[in-house]
Image: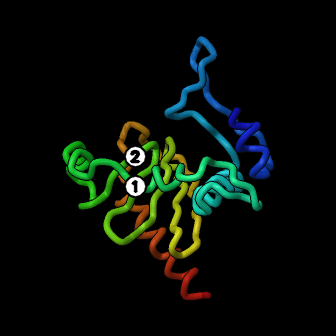
Amino acid sequence: LVSERLWKPMGAQQDATVLKDRTGVALKGSGMSSSLRDLARVGELVRLEGRFNGKQLLQPGTVAELRKGGDQSAFRAGRPNAREGASYHNQWWIAPGNDHSFEAQGFGGQRIYIDPQNELVIVKTASEVNLNIEPKPTDLDRPIFDAITTAVTQAH
């Protein structure tokens, strides 16, 4: 279904792979693998509110639902080190305040960072050394994403 309705219409260059459990059921919370360029296409699809190459691939309102975020107080209660105003909703991490950026995070440090205001998508691939440590995207990635955003916007 993902291949038919999303992957092919957005022009993915390579097939993605999905981990399955022993019974053949896809692990939906983790385990998808694809190329950097195809992840960037996913980011661009989301940045453009579900439109890609002139076609509406996601239902209208889907991205708005993602971006509204979750309960900030519940998020902060479960993550004492979280930035004030940050939240998590439907597999997306929402930046606090007027930042307007949001990102998907994957196993081992993978990121799809989307900054709609600056028309920017950044994909980070990685392999964190200690996978037992819970990722902290604001510790290292955020300053890097901010620096890239500044450099790109100043160049325009």
Task: Please name the amino acid that badge 2 sits on.
Answer: His
Residue at 60 percent of width and 11 percent of height:
23
Q: Is residue 2 left or right of residue 25?
A: right
Q: Are marks 2 and 1 in contact (CB under 8 Å)?
A: yes
Q: Nearer the viewer, residue 50 or 43?
A: 50
Residue 86 position, x and y percent, is 31, 57
Residue at 37 percent of width and 48 percent of height:
88
Residue 21 position, x and y percent, is 57, 18
Q: Quadrant of the N terminus?
A: top right
Residue at 69 percent of width and 54 percent of height:
56
Neighbour tally class for label 1: few under 14, some 14-19, many 20 plus, Cα within 10 Å: few
Secondary structure of residue under mark 1: loop
Q: Quadrant of the C terminus?
A: bottom right
Give whichever of discs 2 and 1 has the lower sequence position: 1
Neighbour tally class for label 2: few under 14, some 14-19, many 20 plus, Cα within 10 Å: some
Vertical order, 156 against 149 (above or below): below
**Residue 111: numbered disc:** none
Residue 95 position, x and y percent, is 37, 61
Secondary structure of residue under mark 2: strand
Query: Residue beneath label 1, please?
Result: 68
Q: Nearer the viewer, residue 90 or 133?
A: 90
Please identify the quarter of the rendering in which residue 55 is found: bottom right
Marker count (numbered): 2
Vertical order, 85 against 65 (above or below): below
Query: Residue beneath label 2, please?
Result: 89
Residue 44 position, x and y percent, is 64, 60
Q: Is residue 101 left or right of residue 17?
A: left
Q: Nearer the viewer, mark 2 or mark 1?
A: 1
Please identify the quarter of the rendering in which residue 27 is found: top right
Marks 2 and 1 sit apart, C-alpha to C-alpha, by 8 Å
Vertical order, 90 against 27 (above or below): below
Task: Please name the amino acid that badge 1 sits on.
Answer: Lys
